[in-house]
Image (cartoon, rainbow, N blue to C red):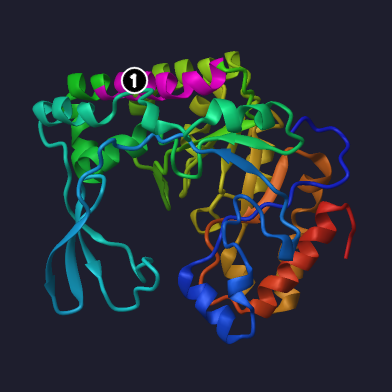
């Protein structure tokens, strides 16, 4: 991340669909011998280990998760975050659906709903941290020799993500215009809650290598909110949040958003964001083009087109060779641009990992 010489670039990956794991089991992989938590590493494919501080930034208490009704091959479910959705039963495996839900209802419809919802977000509640973390975990965190991250994947939710979970995409899109006072209140609350929930860990002297702020605020063709809207409502609080983390010793702040977030990148960089991930290729997020446009101050993670992995070995090799200049330059960690889908054969994935490891060590092929 500092553009300095290294023995190898980090080998990270995201994970797979459950349906992919099932396919690979049928193709001969001993799936029960793997952890399947690729964020913390997977020795079979020489993924580098990472440790995540398990801070809970979710609702406490959550809503009761329950099936409200079933009709044919669909069911209506109330989720733990209060969202009610219609889910497809067909193709479900180990809790993973074969398609996205249809979202029907969200917990915040009025300012009064938000006032009530805030009671589920009491910052720094003791239950938000591992039991006896100061006694058992803190000494090891302070003497570690591996990357340490504040919050597990998709725990440290950002401003757009939380507001969308509370209101839904359509209602949020109107909310910036119809309920500006409520939106300002939400953005301020999100920053305050995230800071105060992070504070006990950081004030204990822990200096995480990075924090992921999960936003998912873009679609295929661009952001789900305008740059002007981002600047008006989110930027001041994002800047405050990033400044807090860096003042407390967090080295890097990374924003996770699928889709094409290019129009928002200047605002993210103004806030002090160091990296973006996962650079979704179907949305036109080419890491080489992004580096040319925004320079080395913006580190890049992801960028490997999952569609290429479903082709043949030659296509995979050709795709990976395009990353050689970025890997040599630094500030770039190539990973598949989301979960590996079930159209990717095991043989293709293993070839991809062998070739990627060569690139990460600086070896051409």
Secondary structure, mark 1, is helix
Please give left or right for residue 37 compared with residue 235 in the image.
Answer: right
Residue at position x 61%, y 79% in the image: 345
Q: In this view, does 362 lie above or below 198?
A: below
* Residue designated by label 1: 232
Identify the image quadrant of the C terminus: bottom right
Q: Is residue 303 above or below residue 136?
A: below
Spot occupied by residue 84 in the image (x, y as percentages of width and height)? 18, 53
Dominant secondary structure (helix, strand or loop) of the stretch shown in magenta: helix
> Which sits in the foreground, 308 or 140?
140
Q: Is residue 197 above or below residue 157?
A: above
Please give left or right for residue 280 compared with residue 323 in the image.
Answer: left
Q: Is residue 176 visible?
A: no
Q: Give the range drawn in magenta.
A: 186-203
**Residue 322 is one of the magenta-drawn residues:** no
Residue at position x 35%, y 35% in the image: 160
Please give left or right for residue 296 compared with residue 98 in the image.
Answer: right
Residue 178 picture quarter:
top left
Spot occupied by residue 62 in the image (x, y as percentages of width and height)? 25, 42
Spot occupied by residue 168 in the image (x, y as percentages of width and height)? 23, 44
Identify the image quadrant of the N terminus: top right
> Which sits in the foreground, 181 or 141?
141
Residue 328 picture quarter:
top right
Residue at position x 35%, y 25% in the image: 125
Please give left or right for residue 358 compared with residue 104 in the image.
Answer: right
Local packing at callout 1 (Cα closer than 10 Å; few below 14, some 14-19, many 20+) is some
Spot occupied by residue 276 in the image (x, y as percentages of width and height)? 57, 39
């Amino acid at each position: 991340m500092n553009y300095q010489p290294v023995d190898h670039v980090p080998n990270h990956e995201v994970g797979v669909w459950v349906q992919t794991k099932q396919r690979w089991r049928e193709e001969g992989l001993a799936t029960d011998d793997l952890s399947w938590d690729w964020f913390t590493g997977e020795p079979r494919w020489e993924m580098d280990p990472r440790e995540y501080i398990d801070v809970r930034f979710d609702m406490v208490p959550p809503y009761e998760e329950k099936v409200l009704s079933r009709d044919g091959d669909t069911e209506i479910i109330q989720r733990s975050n209060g969202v009610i959705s219609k889910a497809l039963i067909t193709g479900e495996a180990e809790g993973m659906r074969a398609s996205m839900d249809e979202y029907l209802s969200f917990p915040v419809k009025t300012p009064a709903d938000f006032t009530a919802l805030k009671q589920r977000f009491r910052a720094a509640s003791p239950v938000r941290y591992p039991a006896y973390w100061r006694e058992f975990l803190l000494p090891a965190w302070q003497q570690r020799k591996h990357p340490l991250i504040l919050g597990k994947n998709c725990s440290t939710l950002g401003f757009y993500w939380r507001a969308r979970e509370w209101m839904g995409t359509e209602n949020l899109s109107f909310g910036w215009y119809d309920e500006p006072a409520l939106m300002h209140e939400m953005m301020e609350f999100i920053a305050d809650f995230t800071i105060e929930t992070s504070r006990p860990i950081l004030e204990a002297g822990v200096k995480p290598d990075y924090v992921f702020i999960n936003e998912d605020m873009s679609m295929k063709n661009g952001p789900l909110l305008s740059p002007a809207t981002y600047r008006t409502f989110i930027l001041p609080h994002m800047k405050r949040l990033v400044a807090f983390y860096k003042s407390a010793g967090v080295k890097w702040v990374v924003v996770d958003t699928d889709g094409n977030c290019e129009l928002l990148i200047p605002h993210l960089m103004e806030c002090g964001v160091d990296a973006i991930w996962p650079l979704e290729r179907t949305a036109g997020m080419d890491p080489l083009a992004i580096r040319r446009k925004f320079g080395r101050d913006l580190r890049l993670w992801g960028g490997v087109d999952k569609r290429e992995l479903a082709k043949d070995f030659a296509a995979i090799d050709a795709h990976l060779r395009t990353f050689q200049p970025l890997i040599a330059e630094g500030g770039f960690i190539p990973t598949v641009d989301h979960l590996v889908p079930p159209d990717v054969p095991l043989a293709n994935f293993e070839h991809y990992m062998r070739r990627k490891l060569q690139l990460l060590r600086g070896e051409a092929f």
